[in-house]
DNA sequence: GTAAATTTTAAACAGTTGTTTTATTTATGA
DNA sequence: TCATAAATAAAACAACTGTTTAAAATTTAC
C-alpha cells in the first residue's frame, strides 16, 4: 500500500473524466485527447493502462454494471418469491440499485443510464453483446417477473414492451439534463433524477400492462 | 425538361444513399466518402450540390418532414374539432401520415423515424431547433390534443410523457430491424413496420394516460 | 456550331482520429 | 545503493475527416 490517500492515480482519473464525456457526447464523438486533457494526464496513458479505446469503454461501463446488476438481480429474486406481484413493483426493483450508484459519484445514476443509452445506439452491438453475455440472467429474471405480474401477455408482447420500456428510460435519461432545464423554465418544476425515475415508472407500468389489441 | 426518366441525377442519388446510411449509422459516423461511394458519385459533388454536410443532413430530414408534418397536422386539427377524444385516437393521427412516407421510398416510414432519433441524439440540438422552428405548430396541436383527451394531466405531466413517448418510438424504430429479426427467430412473429407501429400505440396511449402518482 | 454556363472529376488541403515508438522519469525491491 | 521494473512524456505514425481548388468534361443557349 503505497498510494497517498488524496491523490488519484492516472487510471482512476481517466475513468472519471471518460464516463462524464462519454455520457454527454457519446463514445464515438469523444476523442482520447479530449479525455486525457480533461483528466490532466498524458494521451498515451489510455493505451498504456487500458490497451485501447474499446477496452476503456468496457471498463467505464462495467464499473457501473458490476454494482448495479447484482443488486437489481437480488431485488428481482426477492420479488419473485412473493405470491402476487404487480408491474409497479417490478420496476421499483431497479430504483434503489440505480440510486445506490451514487457510491461511484454523485451523478452516478444519470451517468449510468446515459451510458447505457449511448451503448445501445452508438456502437452497433458490441456493448449489447457484452451486457447480455455477462448479465443475461438479470434480464431473464426481469422477464420472469413481468410474466408473473402480467400473465395475460404473450412472450412476444413482453419482449416488445421490454424494448419499448428500455427506449423510454434510456432516451429520457440521455437528454435528462436538457429536459429538466426546460421543465424548470416552462413549468417551474425542479426535480432530481430520482424524481424523474419515479415519474417514469407509472408510465412504464401502465404501458407494459396495457391491454394488447 | 431535359432529364431522361430512368436516370437519376446526382443530387437525388446522394439523398437516397445518405438517408439510408444516416439512419443506420448516425450522422457523425457516416462520412461523405461513404455516401458518395454508395451513391456512385464524386466526393466533391456533395459540397457542390448541398454546400456542406450539415446542409445535406437538413435536406435529408426535410424531404420527409415536408410530407409528414402537414399531414399529421391536418389529422390532429380534424380530431380537435370532435367533442370527445381519447389518447388512442391522438396517436392514430400519426399512423397514416407515417405510412404515406412510402411515396419517398418503400422503407420510408422506418427511415424517417430512425433519422428522427438520430437527430435527437447525435447533434446536440441543431436539428431539434430546425424542427421546432419549422414545424412547431404541429407539436402544439399534438399537446393540445393530449390535453383534450386527458384533461386530468398537468402541463408538466404532458410535457414529460410526450418525451417518454418520443423516446419509446424513436428508440424502438432505431433498432427495429434487429428487434424484428429477434422476434422472428424467437417467437416466429413476422411483422412489418405498420404492425410494429400498431403494437406500440396501446403502450403509448396507456402510458400517457396513466394515473400520475 | 460555337461560346458560355453547368456539372463532374482528381488532387490536394488542413485538421482530427486512435495507436505506436522512443526516450525520460519515477518507483520498487534486494 | 544500484539494477530493475513501472509509469509518464513528447513525438511521430498512418488513416481518416470535411472542404477547396483547378482542370476537364458535359450540357445549355443562341
Image (cartoon, coloured by chain):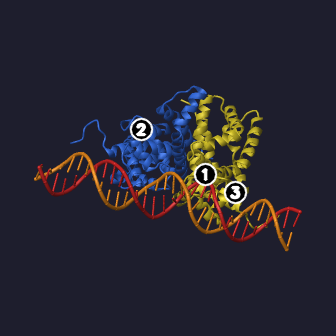
Chain colours: A blue, B yellow, C orange, D red
Farthest top residue? A188
Residue visible at 65% across and 32% down?
B150
Residue A92 in view (yes/no): yes
Q: Which residue is mark 2?
A: A108
- CA distance for labels 1 and 3: 24 Å
In the image, residue B136 above or below residue D17: above
Residue visible at 65% across and 56% down?
B47
Residue visible at 54% across and 33% down?
A180
Point out which mark residue A3 bears.
Answer: none
**Mark 3 or mark 2: which is in front?**
3
In this rendering, position of residue A48 left or right of residue A116: left
Residue A148 in view (yes/no): no
How would you rate the neighbour count of disc 1 (Cα within 10 Å): few for under 14, some for 14-19, many for 20 or more?
many
Q: Viewer-proximal residue, B20 or B190?
A: B20
How would you rate the neighbour count of disc 2 (Cα within 10 Å): few for under 14, some for 14-19, many for 20 or more?
some
Q: Earlier in the sequence, mark 1 or mark 3?
A: 3
**Place of residue B104 in the rendered image (x, y in percent of width and height, measured from the top left):** 72, 56
Q: Viewer-proximal residue, B10 or B183?
A: B10
Point out which mark residue B49 bears.
Answer: 3
In the image, residue A47 above or below residue A39: below
Q: Given the image, what chain letter belongs to the residue carrying mark 3?
A: B
Discs 1 and 3 share one subunit: yes
**Place of residue B89 in the rendered image (x, y in percent of width and height, measured from the top left):** 70, 41
In this rendering, position of residue B183 left or right of residue D23: left
Q: Viewer-proximal residue, C25 or C20?
A: C25
**Mark 1 or mark 3: which is in front?**
3
Q: Given the image, what chain letter belongs to the residue carrying mark 1?
A: B
Q: Which residue is mark 1?
A: B114
Q: Secondary structure at mark 3?
A: helix
- CA distance for labels 2 and 1: 29 Å
Q: Secondary structure at mark 1?
A: helix
Amino acid at each position: 500500500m503505497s498510494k497517498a490517500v488524496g491523490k488519484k492515480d492516472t487510471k482512476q482519473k481517466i475513468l472519471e473524466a471518460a464516463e462524464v464525456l462519454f455520457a454527454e457526447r457519446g463514445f464515438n464523438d469523444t476523442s482520447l485527447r479530449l479525455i486525457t486533457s480533461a483528466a490532466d494526464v498524458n494521451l498515451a496513458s489510455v493505451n498504456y493502462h487500458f490497451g485501447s479505446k474499446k477496452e476503456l469503454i468496457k471498463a467505464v461501463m462495467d464499473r457501473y454494471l458490476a454494482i448495479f446488476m447484482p443488486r437489481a438481480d437480488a431485488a428481482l429474486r426477492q420479488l419473485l418469491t412473493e405470491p402476487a406481484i404487480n408491474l409497479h413493483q417490478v420496476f421499483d426493483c431497479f430504483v434503489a440499485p440505480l440510486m445506490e450508484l451514487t457510491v461511484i459519484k454523485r451523478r452516478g445514476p444519470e451517468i449510468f443510464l446515459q451510458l447505457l443509452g449511448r451503448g445501445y445506439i452508438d456502437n452497433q452491438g458490441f456493448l449489447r453483446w457484452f451486457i447480455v453475455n455477462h448479465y443475461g440472467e438479470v434480464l431473464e429474471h426481469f422477464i420472469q417477473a413481468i410474466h408473473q405480474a402480467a400473465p395475460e401477455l404473450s412472450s412476444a408482447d413482453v419482449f416488445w414492451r421490454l424494448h419499448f420500456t428500455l427506449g423510454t428510460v434510456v432516451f429520457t435519461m440521455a437528454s435528462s439534463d436538457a429536459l429538466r432545464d426546460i421543465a424548470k423554465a416552462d413549468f417551474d418544476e425542479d426535480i432530481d433524477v430520482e424524481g424523474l425515475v419515479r415519474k417514469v415508472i407509472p408510465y412504464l407500468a401502465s404501458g407494459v400492462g396495457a391491454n394488447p389489441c
